[in-house]
Amino acid sequence: MRLNRGLLSGLASLALLPAVGRAQAPGSNFTNSWFWGVSGGMMTYWTTNVAHAQAPTVGIEWLITRKHTALYIGVDQSFFKTSPVQYGEIGIQYGDSTRSLSNATQIEYPHSATIHNSRHINLALMGFPGSGPIRPYAGVGVSLNFVQNAFANPVFPAANPYGFGNSQFWVPQAFGTEELDQQAYWVSPLIMAGLQIQVSRFSVFGQAKVMTTDRNHLFSDGAFFNLEAGVRYNVATIF
């Protein structure tokens, strides 16, 4: 009886080996899975007032994987405040002492603003060429970028700087604020690259993001640069 019990136990153990092997096989906790992740890092940006400025950034993300590809959806929040930022020119009108706008002449006057914090919604297709627990990856997609708080600074002089005399007056135009609102958000290409190290359902990762911008959107250089590190967790695997 003892021999039979031992033999049955051994056979049961052998029967479980393929299942254990499948559970521990490389990629078994990556392929066809949903990952939730959190990250932290730094964003580098440029304006007419600052160069190579650093802003702390936090993010959440959702990764839907196949064997070597994935869909990436993420939201990053960056924290900064800078002033002044020149974002274009605003129309100023001057006229005669009758304050008649029909005879007024418009002058383009430089405008500036204070900008505070930004949010970036990222969508990308990613490739994971490896098959083990250590996987480099890269991706391309789009980023929706929002400056969350942008406030126009007073730029209108108390006296007319162009020498038109005391009889002239200044009339700020409303489209200056509208222009600021339009320049506070934009859609840009996104490029990503990173490395993920997976242990069971948990992964740690580091990644870099590049999101383009231009002088028409409150920033003076060609891109934002994000360096991030974080963790991802496999919440579900679809067989």
Image: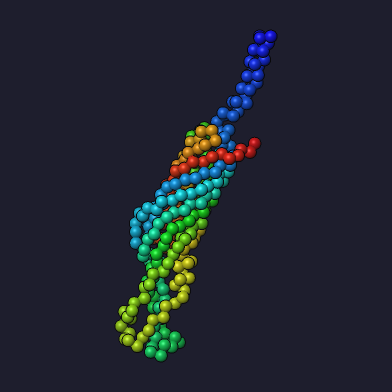
| Residue appearing at x 51%, y 51% in the figure | 75
Residue 211 in picture, x, y percent from top left:
46, 53
Q: Along the horizontal axis of the image, is 199 left or right of 50?
A: right
Residue 118 in picture, x, y percent from top left:
45, 57
- Number of labels in the image equals 0
Residue 156 in picture, x, y percent from top left:
36, 76
Q: Quadrant of the N terminus?
A: top right
Image quadrant assignment for residue 87: bottom left
Out of 207 and 14, give the one closest to the viewer. Answer: 14
| Residue appearing at x 48%, y 66% in the figure | 182
| Residue appearing at x 33%, y 85% in the figure | 164
Image quadrant assignment for residue 201: top right
Out of 220 and 230, give the one closest to the viewer. Answer: 230
| Residue appearing at x 39%, y 64% in the figure | 114
Q: Quadrant of the C terminus?
A: top right
Q: Residue furthest bottom?
A: 98
Q: Along the horizontal axis of the image, is 59 left or right of 5?
A: left
Residue 82 in picture, x, y percent from top left:
37, 61
Out of 40 and 182, give the one closest to the viewer. Answer: 40
The way the protein has been coloured in the rendering is: rainbow
State whether residue 37 appears in this view. yes
State whether residue 65 appears in this view. no
Image quadrant assignment for residue 3: top right
Q: Is residue 23 above or below residue 156?
A: above
